[in-house]
Amino acid sequence: MGKSGVELPMNRPNLIYIVADQLRLTSLSYTGDKRAQTHHIDALRAESLSFCNAVSGHPVCAPYRASLFTGKYTTGTGMVINEIRLNPAHHPRCFAHVLDEAGYECSYLGKWHLWADQLGNHYDPKNSFVPPGPDRLGFNGYFAHYNFHHNFYGAAAYYHRDTPEKIYTSGYEPDAHTDMAIAELERLSAGNKPFAFFFSPGTPHDPWVPENVPGECLERFNDTAFPLPENYLPENDPYADNWSKLSDRERSELPSWMRVYYAMTANLDGNIGKLTMALKRLGLYNNTIIVFTSDHGELFGAHGRRAKNIFYDEAVRVPFLMRWKGCLQEGSTSDVCLNTADIMPTLLALMDIPVPDAVEGTSVKDCILGISGAAEPDGALMMSTGATANFEDGHEWRAFRTKSHTYAVYRVDNKELLFDNIADPLQMHNIAGDPAHKAVKNDLREKMLAAMQQIGDTFEACSWYEKNWVRDRHIIRTAGTGGRK
């Protein structure tokens, strides 16, 4: 029981986990963005606990998903870049395994991104189809999926069930997937078991071209101005990989990219509204933990970068809303530092399910329930172990983010950065070399190194992982299975 007098119910709640793709925290109207049209997400926020310091511990699609399902950091999952294949033998008790053991029916719909073993060739079933069995990480029932694609109309918009056969969606894929999600919720609600449903829509990920979003959504932003970010830099960040660099042509297209991004987000918002209505109609709304979040954000030229894979707030800060009627205070905010690896243990603890010993993240259940004396994490360890999808050295970094500061260091030259996120929310002023902030820098560096040591992270170059952990883009070992500690 929390200090507020809230008692967790004896019957197990259902779980619905919705993870958008590349949706940053600051592009929602509930966080103050006047351009955003997200009133359904705003309504969910009004009934939810919002984590204002939730971050993506490795802000890239596949590393995030590996961390979500295992409760481990990238150095424990081996998913050091995109477009490599996770090894299920290293992770025998993932999120869905544990839920299944506890009597839950587990379903999955949408982008998976833990299977491919080629860079590109995304539309070949050998890269897009995940066969039934251990590679589905415990999702042994309904599994409607594709590994990776982000063109949402026509021949590119398809999914698989239990065979390599492509099943094409009609209309706009995110809308079709929402209809599929509602149909699956109808099926689950008719059963006699609690359920966990993970839904991974593909928006608002690029390509941000008008042909990749419904016209009516785009028209809603015809009169909206999209200036360059205040912390925009006209030169590419020298630490950026090729996915993060901007050409002159791309820089000229940033306003039009943002218009499509916001249109995709508005469409996502409408689909969240449809899901919410379905949950109410099916009588699921009040005994279901509903989570709405994202895997990482997007920079749009901030700090001289596009995309993600960096410690700046535009990339790492994500929405994280959690609604559980009667157990979590509606409209409340938690400032606890919530990292990706913490999600699995926190939700399992809330559901009164034991957390596997192999999990590296920390449950913040007691913090969000207001348990007296609950210890909070000091901050969040964040990392990049290479280029977005190439084994290429020179882009590796580690960072530690607290409620007030971000400390980061690059491996290639040991350059340190420190930002006061309260006084400098756009992170435009690196104060790492300022003697007035030396104590803060040293404290965060020590906390980061301690967190790294705890999980056996030795801050290797990307090529080290290619040499020691991966063969033909298949992960063959990790720190937890005989790798370097």
Image: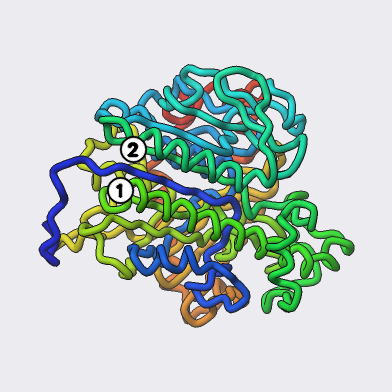
Marks 1 and 2 in Cβ contact (< 8 Å): yes
Residue at the spot x=53%, y=49% of the render?
Answer: 58
Q: The disc labelled 2 sits on which kind of residue? A: Ser
Above or below 424: residue 22: above
Above or below 409: residue 93: above
Which one is earlier in the sequence, the residue at label 1 or at label 2?
Answer: 2
Residue nearest the observer in this picture, 155 or 410: 155
Measuring from the top left, give residue 135's x and y in whole percent.
Answer: 51, 22
Measuring from the top left, give residue 423's x and y in whole percent.
Answer: 49, 82
Q: Residues within 10 Å of mark 2 (few under 14, many from 20)?
A: some
Name the residue carrying label 2: 189
Residue nearest the observer in this picture, 154 or 257: 154
Q: Is residue 375 visible?
A: no
Image quarter (top left, top right, bottom left or bottom right) of the N terminus? bottom left
* Visual colour scheme: rainbow
Above or below 367: residue 140: above
Q: Which mark is residue 283?
A: 1
Q: CA distance from mark 1 to mark 2?
A: 8 Å
Secondary structure found at label 1: loop
